[in-house]
Image (spheres, rainbow, N blue to C red):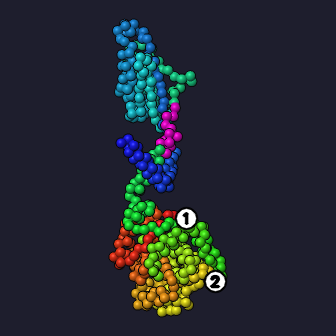
Amino acid sequence: MDKVVSMNENMDLKKFLKLLQKRYISIIITSISIIIFTVCIVILAMKPTYEATESLLIGVFKNKDLQETQEITRIVASSTDFIKSPVVLHKVEKELKISNVSENIVVKNNYNSQIINIVVRSNDSKLAKDIANTVALVARDEMNKLLNSEDIKILSGPDSSTSLKRVDSPLLNIAIGLMVGIFAGIGIAMTREYLDDSVESEFDLEALRLTVLGEVDLKRKMKLKGKQLQSNKKSNKKTFRKLKLSPELVSTEQIRIIRTNIENRQKNCSLLLITSPNLSEQKSIISAKLAISMAEKGKKVLLIDGNLDNPSLHVWFNLDNKSGFTNVILNDGNLHIHSHYTYTTGLSLLTTGPLLDERSKVWGSHILENSITNLKTHYDLIIIESRDFLSASDSQILAKYCNDVLLVVKKNSTTKEDLIKTKKYLETGNKNILGVIFQVK
């Protein structure tokens, strides 16, 4: 029983540490924000608090009878109450021309001590000293009169001035802000984790009865794509660039694993649609690398850019996009005129071609089905990279003519709800989901 409890505690700790690792950016941003806010409050808005202290010594009275009949402790206790009485405070308020003095005063007396401390706190150091000194003077004079004595004395410092010190601590406030920031960051991270419906691991995909064909890491994808775009703009002539299976874009082994798993699951598939539930997943580079990998196995492959909303395959291969898929569909054009050869033997690319304001002309064309059917006779494998499935009907129309569908799912981005919707729509149309490529970055 103890071992089970210990194991559960270890699992909970593991989950918590993974949560901190996953949401560390949120925790850092929240902590820094609260610390900056605290520092601004401490420096700009929070006024310093000063504490002024005056001490009264209740001595041995000249009135011997009084000394014999009254215990000194009772006199000290009475003096403590007397200092905060209206007799003293009203006189102090009148003399200093202020009000509500009692709110700033604390009278302290240690057990068995004849010294009474008058402590005054205020944001104004001069006012704190004036109140403490005036209260001590008025209290001394009034009590000496009442007791017919001169034995109540004010204990000032060496320079005969009221003791003054700053009692608030900016560093303590900032430290508190730091702790609050860290706990608030962890709290926000836990809340986000609780509300997060995104796919976190392959286990989530398997729970939805989806087969994971492999993982890809596109961490450097956008950076390198930006460099390539700049290179294209500087080039004045049409050039070809071989998109190699190098680790700088997508791991060679990752693509080869996916290719092998596809081949193991395909049953005479000649047309493969690659899509994703949403815009966050990057499909173009995955489609390009997969097409190259298939062609390197000796297959005659055609890669089609069916993303009329945001075409990008021509960028990766450093080709123009003056003609392509739309020309073939709308004008019943010759495939070989509008397609492009690449440096990879056996791989051709059909870009989107001219983009249209009304894409329905393409997807509603009666030539679409015939064109795709004719393409199958010229190639061993056709890969169509389409736009996200849930945003428009483009992918749903293309899926009608494809044997299999390959989904790209991005870790911590694609939601389970959207993935379930996509899966449901495809299964309703009797489409075979070949598997999932899990984009981890």
The earlier-in-sequence mark between 1 and 2 is 1
Q: Is residue 149 magenta?
A: no
Q: Position of residue 328 (x, y in %)?
A: 49, 89
Which residue is under mark 2? 238
Q: Position of residue 135 (x, y in %)?
A: 43, 26
Q: Position of residue 23 (x, y in %)?
A: 47, 55
Around disc 1, counting alpha carbons within 10 Å, would you say few (fewer than 14), some (14 to 19), or many (20 or more)? some
Q: Residue 219 shows which numbered tag?
A: 1
Q: Is residue 171 magenta?
A: yes
Q: Is residue 365 above or below residue 253?
A: below
Which amino acid, mark 1? Lys
Give whichever of 96, 230 is nearer the camera: 230
Q: Is residue 277 above or below residue 194?
A: below
Judge depth for marks 1 and 2 and give the one in front.
1
Q: Is residue 343 left or right of residue 274?
A: right
Q: Residue at x 37, y 65 (%)?
A: 208
Which quadrant, please, contains the N terminus?
Answer: top left
Around disc 2, counting alpha carbons within 10 Å, would you say few (fewer than 14), some (14 to 19), or many (20 or more)? few
- Quarter of the figure with residue 277: bottom left
Q: Is residue 23 left or right of residue 69?
A: right
Q: Residue 121 shows which numbered tag?
A: none
Q: Secondary structure at mark 2?
A: loop
Q: Residue at x 35, y 78 (%)?
A: 429
Residue 141 in view, yes or no: no
Q: Write the start and end of the magenta stretch as one range.
A: 165-178
- Quarter of the figure with residue 134: top left
Disc 1 versus disc 2: distance between alpha carbons?
29 Å
Residue 378 in view, yes or no: yes
Which amino acid, mark 2? Lys
